Image (tube, rainbow, N blue to C red):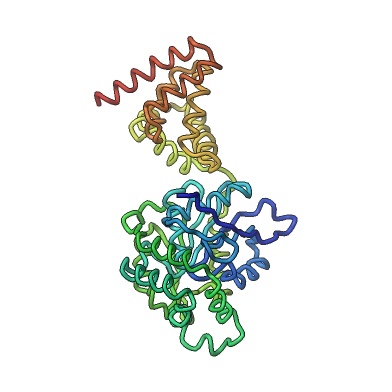
Amino acid sequence: MTELRLRGAMTPAAPSAAAAPLLVLLPSLGTTAELWDGAVAQLAQDVARPRILRVDLPGHGASPVARDGFTVADLARAVLTIVDEIGGGAFHVAGDSLGGAVALELAITASERVLSLAMFCSGAAIGTPDGWAERAAQVRASGTASVVAGSAQRWFAPGYLDAHPDGPGGHALKTLIDVDDESYALCCEALATFDRRPDLGTVRAPSLVVAGSHDQVTTPALMRELADGIPGARFVELADAAHLVPLEDPAQTAALLSTTLLRTAAPSGPTTEDGMRVRREVLGDAHVDRATAAITPETADFQDFITRYAWGEVWARPQLSRQQRSIATLASLVTGGHENELRMHVKAALRNGLTRTEIAEVIHHTAIYAGLPAANSALAIMRDVFMEETNG
């Protein structure tokens, strides 16, 4: 299978907005980045003023056509590639329908990078495998033009197209005809296999779930169930919309996104609570409980300092994964001869997902630059930790 590639476009930002938060917007099946035009125009005037990256699905808009099968997870990885190409780092993500599913996948699998999640008319599973298989077969046989009438019924609230005869809804239906047939069918098949319902409880990002009252695909009842499954998620139902909320109600869409961005704005500095959470995730509760129990009045300030800045700031930065930070930490500790800390971070590296072979290879590699005696001592410590882990 060839690597899946997507294309996106950045909305020009004001010169003073270089450090503004990045908002990634993902469209629904059959639509392009234009789905968000109205909301983006509103956000450009808003106090939040984010940098905005809009990404097209395969064979939609600016993105290349696809000829090999892919999954929603593949789409999420392709989105991360685009984000990395424009500078990387953490970002807010919002999507409608299939775009919302991709956004959810990012919040689950790249949680350290997702600042907030907004799902419009979407779900942790959408439709049925048989239904998507039938849609894919229809498009392969008769093209995307054959689904225009059905899409008009699903996408818009009753009376919307009549009330806006020259509006964006009609343009979206014309754009659907230009979508590559095979790419559309492959998107259907990706949705057929997508089911993240068991993983909703792992979402850590502040989340917004928006339903359209007239949506017969991802109904308000299903969207409320989705919100109930995501810890702390905010649920909103818009009375005059169906399945394409960002197009039908761009003003409300922009207002909801702006509120989410402002609520999740980075605090002025790392907090002890954030640092303690990361510290426990990396080192384990048992180690942290022992360290906390050993705090004295003389060491309390220092413990608070390292909890806030080592764990709440440096270890929480999204530019490196936990595994990559473990590799850097192990190499630094071997080089500095900090054997007490090394024992702790060998255990942490295992918790962060490095294998025993990878940990040994890091120390082996470091021997070239830190010296053989340092690496030899480190390997002995590593061996002891592995034996302790094996013996419980």
Side (left or right) of 249 relative to 128:
right
Depth check: give the residue in front, 275 or 146. 146
Q: Give percent across and percent down for residue 257.
A: 55, 65
Q: Give percent across and percent down for residue 260.
A: 53, 62
Side (left or right) of 343 relative to 367:
left
Side (left or right) of 352 relative to 53:
left
Decide: is 237 above or below 114: below
Decide: is 5 above or below 161: above
- Whether residue 116 can be seen here: yes
Q: Which residue is drawn at 56% across and 78% down?
A: 174
Residue at the top extreme, as displayed: 373
Residue at the right extreme, as displayed: 15
- Whether residue 292 can be seen here: no
Decide: is 287 above or below 187: above
Q: Give percent across and percent down for residue 302.
A: 51, 29
Number of labelled discs? 0
Q: Residue at x 45, y 22 (%)?
A: 341
**Rendered-image quadrant of the C terminus:** top left
Q: Which residue is drawn at 31% across and 55% down?
A: 198
Depth check: give the residue in front, 293 or 284. 284
Residue at the front extreme, as displayed: 141
Quadrant of the rendered image containing residue 286: top left
Q: Residue at x 42, y 61 (%)?
A: 233
Q: Give percent across and percent down for residue 306.
A: 51, 32
